[in-house]
Image: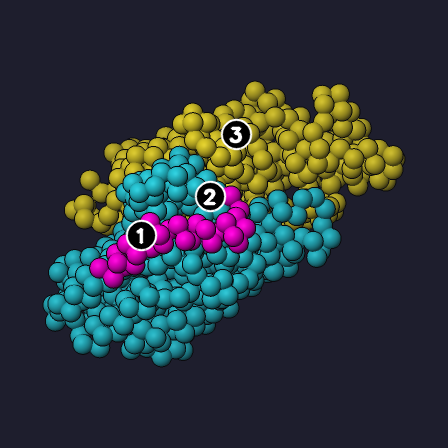
Chain colours: A yellow, B cyan
């Protein structure tokens, strides 16, 4: 059985089937790949299991859904021109699954950088390795070991992402199954650009934190690369290019991807401050404590400065430290009072509106159009 | 100009020309790729420059030399069977360069894990980002920022490694130049295995540190994956498979790669304890201070335990802490006195001997045979 051959999954015809289909490809990859890690040493196998486990509980599969949406949209286009070499739905799902492995690396490393203890309501990977260190009764600093192990775990996820994308596996080629179709150069180039963009966006994010850049423009620049391109626009484009979508459709999807991606991140900012931790899986106010320069904070500061410089001082003073519940509530009220929350909510609606209008005019099938519009609404108005 | 098209470099006919040819491919890739980072934001461009700069001062190019040695050996084999699709020397050099980007990620992340301040006589990447933080007058903990930035920098190097390996670039496909030849599935599988192996070996290394595993067997197991496979055997195999080397030659090269790889690491262990810091570029005794479970240490402990348990206690006590010059000298004397240094030196000679014997009997051209044997001797007896 080839590590990258088609898993026995049904071909998704709607976006709601994509998470399960992606999960099946990932399990197929893990079935072939985890034994390679275990053969190095049992303890390495257990570390690889932690990575696989993290990917399995991988949340909403947003990026695979957008990639597959791009695929379905382009497949339904009357102007589609199949790429060379032609791609199958199996190839498309493989790229969907590979996106989840890139995301695993991004989250594992982000959680180290942000010193986060929980993710999706579970311990972060560096905390899991710290616990393994304690449970095994090992010597030395457990927290330091946890970080070291999680750096390597994230690297493993990133290496596996490229293995899956390229259609190969550490388990070797001699499986007798047919090799996957090579990817068109246009698809590989988008994949390459996406990885450099998300890493660049993450770096810009941590620079904005320490440089104290308060401008709304800088917050948007981070969103553009760290979220909009990486989470929506590039996945849509990957799927569409694999199916041979025409240039006008690619333009449509880039525009839709940008708008929905920014809306996705703006909602994330609001959830980070006002969300229910039981639903989001992470403590409320974490972004603020971490000193994250979100658009919500930038806009809050800008508006506070214009209306009441004392409240701007109070807000600035809250950045980068842990607040108790009373303090956090005062900051929440302040963001509401200066109108920053309303403005972000309105901005989300405008972005959603622009995306939906563009989708309504795109030359794609009615099913995928309706599916994408519904997903756009969920993305913009989610509560977790 | 395509980001992955052949640079205008001569085709290396001996291994001594490989470092320059590899460097030319890397510069070509950077010329196309660095502007993509700079377009995200100037500060991202400067971070990407730090990564490129680290790769440029990349030391001895050992892995490219072995990969190209595998290529030349297989090309000279009378039993060569060209793979499908056939590969060019340009493809081979691209893979050589990609190996250096994997290595950049490994070193950047290793230096974070080991809290190392210098590498090749220059500040490590996390220290460079810490300095950039200070020079810019940014707020917050500079050391923490340096680590965060270096985690992302290593990720970028790893992503770029796969871009170069796959023959694509974040700069995009629309350059008009012909796409590189797709890689045979056998080559991609070796690349995949190599990355999981080195990460598994690195993880095993940090587990041995904290679990206090003193056995010589464990030290060898780390060497096998972290060094022998990754540094010599897999690069040789990659090159040989790209050229279509026959099964017997692949067996020869795996055996040679294993022996030379272990010899390489044993020499590294000795240099880490007895080397001249001005030549090695890192402080002597660093492995010991870091608690690294080297074969030298494991063997020293084993022999000390057998001869004089008090010296074993002294040696054990020196692991994992900074020693002054007097203490370090006493440990050096102890390792010599119990015969551990002699045994390692003898082991290196035996391994070198086995590798040379195997090379003498391999069915390869006389030039590459002589070149490989000479390189084997330099690897085993280097002073830096």
Residue matched to label 2: B318
Q: What is the chief secondary structure element of the magenta stretch?
A: helix
Label 3: chain letter: A
Circles 2 and 3: CB atoms closer than 8 Å: no
Location of the N terminus of chain B (image quadrant): bottom left
Residue A1 lies in what quarter of the image? top left
Query: Is A38 displayed left or right of B123 in the figure?
Result: left
Location of the C terminus of chain B (image quadrant): bottom left
Query: Is A123 displayed left or right of A241 in the figure?
Result: right
Specify few, some or many for label 2: CA neighbours under 10 Å numbering under 14, 14-19, or 20 or more. Answer: some
Depth check, front residue: A65 or B23: B23
- Residue B340 in magenta stretch: yes
Residue matched to label 3: A119
Q: CA distance from mark 1 to mark 3?
A: 51 Å
Q: CA distance from mark 1 to mark 2?
A: 18 Å
Q: Tell me where the magenta segment starts and ends, as one range.
A: B321-350
- Percent x, y of residue A208: 68, 47
What's the residue at 78%, 35% (across, down)?
A317
Depth check, mark 1 against mark 2: the one in front is 1
Residue B165 lies in what quarter of the image? bottom left
Q: Does label 3 lie on the same chain as label 1? A: no
- Residue B279 in magenta stretch: no
Label 1: chain letter: B
The mark found on residue B339 in the picture is 1
- Percent x, y of residue B181: 30, 64
Would residue B333 be visible to someone looking at this image? yes
Label 2: chain letter: B
- Percent x, y of residue A144: 52, 37
Circles 1 and 3: CB atoms closer than 8 Å: no
């Amino acid at each position: 059985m080839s590590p990258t051959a088609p898993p026995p999954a049904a071909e998704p015809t709607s976006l709601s089937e994509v998470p399960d289909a992606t999960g099946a490809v990932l399990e197929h990859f893990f079935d072939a790949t985890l034994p390679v890690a275990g053969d190095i040493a049992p303890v390495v196998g257990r570390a690889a299991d932690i990575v696989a486990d993290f990917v399995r509980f991988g949340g909403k599969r947003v990026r695979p859904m957008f990639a597959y949406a791009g695929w379905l949209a382009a497949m339904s286009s009357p102007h589609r021109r199949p790429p060379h070499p032609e791609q199958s739905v199996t190839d498309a799902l493989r790229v969907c699954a590979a996106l989840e492995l890139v995301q695993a690396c991004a989250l594992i490393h982000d959680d180290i950088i942000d010193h986060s203890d929980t993710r999706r309501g579970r311990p972060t990977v560096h905390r899991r390795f710290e616990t393994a260190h304690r449970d095994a009764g090992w010597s030395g600093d457990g927290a330091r070991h946890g970080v070291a192990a999680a750096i390597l775990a994230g690297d493993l996820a990133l290496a596996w992402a490229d293995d899956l994308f390229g259609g190969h596996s550490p388990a070797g080629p001699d499986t007798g199954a047919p090799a996957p179709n090579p990817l068109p150069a246009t698809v590989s180039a988008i994949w390459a650009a996406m990885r450099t963009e998300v890493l660049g966006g993450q770096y810009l994010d941590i620079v904005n934190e320490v440089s104290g850049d308060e401008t709304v423009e800088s917050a948007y620049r981070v969103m553009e690369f760290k979220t909009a391109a990486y989470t929506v626009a590039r996945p849509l484009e990957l799927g569409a290019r694999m199916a041979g979508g025409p240039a006008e459709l690619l333009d449509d999807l880039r525009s839709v991807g940008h708008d929905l991606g920014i809306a996705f991140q703006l909602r994330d900012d609001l959830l980070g401050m006002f969300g229910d931790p039981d639903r989001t899986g992470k403590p409320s106010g974490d972004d603020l404590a971490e000193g994250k320069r979100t658009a919500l904070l930038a806009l809050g500061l800008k508006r506070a400065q214009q209306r009441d410089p004392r409240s701007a001082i109070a807000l600035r003073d809250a950045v980068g430290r842990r607040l108790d519940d009373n303090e956090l509530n005062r900051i929440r009220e302040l963001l509401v009072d200066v109108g920053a929350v309303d403005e972000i909510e309105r901005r989300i609606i405008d972005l959603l509106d622009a995306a939906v209008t563009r989708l309504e005019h795109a030359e794609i099938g009615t099913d995928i159009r309706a599916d994408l519009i519904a997903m756009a609404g969920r993305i913009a108005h989610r509560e977790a």
